[in-house]
Every structure is written in C-alpha cells, then in structure tokens.
Amino acid sequence: MKKLIKKIKKALDKREWSVVYKTKDGRTEMYTISKPEHSHEFGNQKEGLATAGFRAFCYNRGAFRSFRYDRIVSLNRA
C-alpha cells in the first residue's frame, strides 16, 4: 500500500523546472522539464565520464530528453 501511495504522489507531483541550455550547434534554448533526478543520470564512455548528464521529461517537446551538465547555463524551479 505504501508503494502505491508513493507512486501516486510522484505522478501527481508536477514540479516543473526551467533549464537554459546551450545546444550542440551553439544555440541557447529554454526548456520546461520535470524535476531532474540522480536516478536518471547517464554517462559517456567515449569521453570517459561516469556522469555526463540526466534525462527528464521536456514539456516543450512532449517527450523525454537528455541534458548534459556541461551545456546547462541555468536550472531553476519554475
């Protein structure tokens, strides 16, 4: 029962964050994303990084997106 309540609470928790992000081609974009979590981090073996960024749901695109830490300009709670 506790697990079910925790899942429902997490689904209803709509904490949105604003991220200003520099894209690979040099443009600066602003996205509204779900709360970044450590459990959604990823690495990059080619660059030898154990943690390169995180994945979060992007409300602008309506899908999960990856965001690299070295390209984030700012991250604020919306």
Image (cartoon, grey):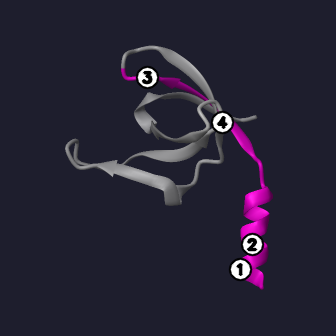
Work out how far the residue at label 3 is from the one at label 1, CA to CA, in angstroms: 38 Å
Q: Where's the C terminus, which quadrant? A: top right
Q: Amino acid at mark 3?
A: Thr
| SS label for mark 3 | loop
Residue of label 3: 23
In terms of secondary structure, where does tag 1 sit?
helix
- Residue 67 to residue 23: above or below: below
- The segment highlighted magenta reads 1-24
Marks 2 and 1 close (CB-CB < 8 Å):
yes
Determine the secondary structure under disc 4.
Answer: loop
Comparing 70 with 24, the one in front is 24
Q: What whole-number distance in Å separates the C-alpha atoms at marks 2 and 4?
A: 23 Å
Q: Are marks 1 and 4 in contact (CB under 8 Å)?
A: no
x and y, in percent, of residue 48 in the image = 22, 47
Q: Residue furthest bottom?
A: 1
The CA distance from mark 2 to mark 1 is 5 Å
* Residue at horizontal 74 percent and vertical 59 percent from the top: 11
In the image, residue 72 sits, relative to residue 15, either above or below, namely: above
Q: Earlier in the sequence, mark 3 or mark 1?
A: 1
On residue 6, which mark appears? 2
* Residue beneath disc 4: 59
Q: Does dot 2 land on a helix, a strand or a loop?
A: helix
Instruction: Give the mark nearer the N terminus: 3 vs 2.
Output: 2
Per the model, the C-alpha gap separating discs 3 and 2 is 35 Å
Q: Identify the residue under disc 1.
A: 3
